[in-house]
Image (cartoon, rainbow, N blue to C red):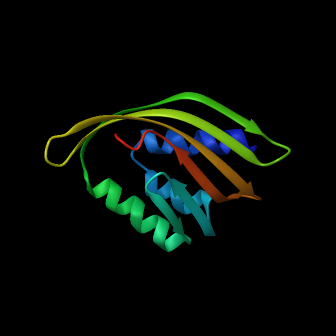
Amino acid sequence: MNYKEKAKDIYEQLQQGNLLDAFDKYYGDDVVMTEPRGTRKGKAECRKYEEEFLASIEEFHSLEIVNLASNEDKAITFIESVMDVTFKGGQRAKMEQVAVQRWEGEKITHERFYYNNEQ
């Protein structure tokens, strides 16, 4: 499976509600995740953040992969996506983002998210 196929599999797992399974499978122990709100380091810290995010969601409506690309030689994937969720408390949000994933072998070592911080 090439990097583009792996990135697609991650987002297909997300669409099926299997975020943590995909995280465990594809993210390295020393992964660094960066977004406008901060940076997390290490698989345990990053997984905890994902667990907290999932716990904040009341209803998951949809996840669309808008664009997906890869540079196989440099082991980098790019995913543009739109997620529609309702958070606990009733606030519905349509979240648009781009994720850039850097891979080493079978695992993501760095992921950076680009989005509007006012979401």
Q: How many marks?
A: 0
Side of 85 where 91 appears, left or right: left
Residue located 49% across and 44% down the image: 13
Q: Which one is nearer the viewer's eye here, 105 or 88?
A: 88
Q: Toward which corner of the image does residue 83 lie, by quadrant? A: top left
Q: Residue at x 19, y 40 (%)?
A: 91
Q: Position of residue 15 (x, y in %)?
A: 43, 38
Locate residue 10 relative to residue 74 in the image: left or right: left
Do we see residue 1 in this rendering?
no
Which residue is the extreme one toward the right?
73
Q: Residue at x 27, y 57 (%)?
A: 55
Say if residue 32 shows up in the picture: yes
Residue 95 x/y as whole percent: 38, 36
Q: Is residue 93 left or right of residue 11?
A: left
Quadrant position of residue 30: bottom right
Q: Image point 59% across, 37% down: which residue? A: 79
Q: Is residue 59 above or below residue 94?
A: below
Position above or below: 91 against 67? below
The answer to whether residue 31 is left or right of residue 2 is left
Furthest residue toward left: 89
Q: Position of residue 107 (x, y in %)?
A: 68, 59
Instruction: Specify the quadrant that holds the N terminus.
Output: top right
Residue 42 occupies quadrant: bottom right
**The C terminus sits in image quarter:** top left
